[in-house]
Image (cartoon, rainbow, N blue to C red):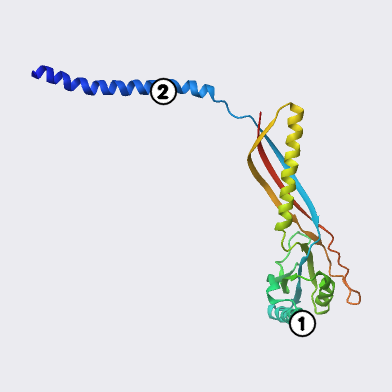
Amino acid sequence: MSPKNLTKNRLTAPTLAMAFALGALLTITGMRPALAEDASPPRTMTVSGTGNLSARPDIAYLESGVLSEGKTAAEALNENTRAMNAIFDGLDKMEIDKDDIRTSQFSVSPLYTQPPVRPDGTRDAPTIRGYQVTNQVTVTVRKLDQLGKILDKLVSLGSNRLDSVRFEIDNPEPLLDKAREAAVLDALRKAKLYASASGVALGPILTISESGSYQQPVYMKAAMAMRDSAPVPVAAGTQNLSASVSLTIAIE
């Protein structure tokens, strides 16, 4: 074979290979628009549903404590410590577990006297007239039938602050699961209604998402005007639990 023919053969083989590859690429690329045109996005319907139920609380959290004042910080602190120790001892005698008693607030702050305003609108700087100590605990009450007695006991032992009593369900998850089931059924009910009204058929559920689930605590506001001579009336009532879901459903 002549050198001229050898060179021609060497150039021809790669050239043909590239031509075939380029032709295949053009063929596949040319098919893509046709495939994209044939594929249409699925028709869907998105609906939301809610589930609600009520149940009786079985646990309570009360915020109670002592506010003390004194001419000096040490005096106010000593008075507050004495009262709080009596409260801790009383809760222990009522068989409240130590793990169910937690300090939620403690502060020492000065008390100021505001001097009178002079005729020219000026006045002297405020002066410290004493100190105030606040010590508050959160008590978990697991026997609700004892809550009234506990409140009475706290007052008799020197508690002069009761900010609130909060009722909850100790283990809400099983009830929230029922609310979630009710939320899905509510969403499906709406989907069937919409499908019937619009003349479409429902397909499979494509996605399910939860918007939120919660239990709504019940609060009993209580001022410290409670009397030692009369038991504190307590009514836990019922508590609402709620769940919300969103469904995306294919339609035909």
Q: Nearer the viewer, residue 9 or 122?
A: 9
Q: Taking the image as drawn, is residue 117 in sight?
A: no
Q: Tell me the quarter of the picture where residue 1 sits.
A: top left
Q: Is residue 238 visible?
A: yes
In the picture, measured across the screen, residue 39 lies left or right of residue 135, that is left
Give 203 or 34, whichever is nearer the viewer.
Answer: 203
Q: Which mark is residue 191?
A: none
Residue 48, by quadrant, is top right
Q: Residue drawn at (67%, 40%), measured in percent from left and top?
A: 247
Q: Residues within 10 Å of mark 2 (few under 14, many from 20)?
A: few
Q: Residue under circle 2?
A: 29
Q: Which mark is residue 93?
A: 1
SS under mark 2: helix
Task: Say which residue appears at 31% left-offset and 21% top-offset.
Answer: 20
Q: In the image shown, does 175 or 211 lie closer to the viewer? A: 175
Residue 65 in the image, given as x and y percentages of width and height: 75, 73
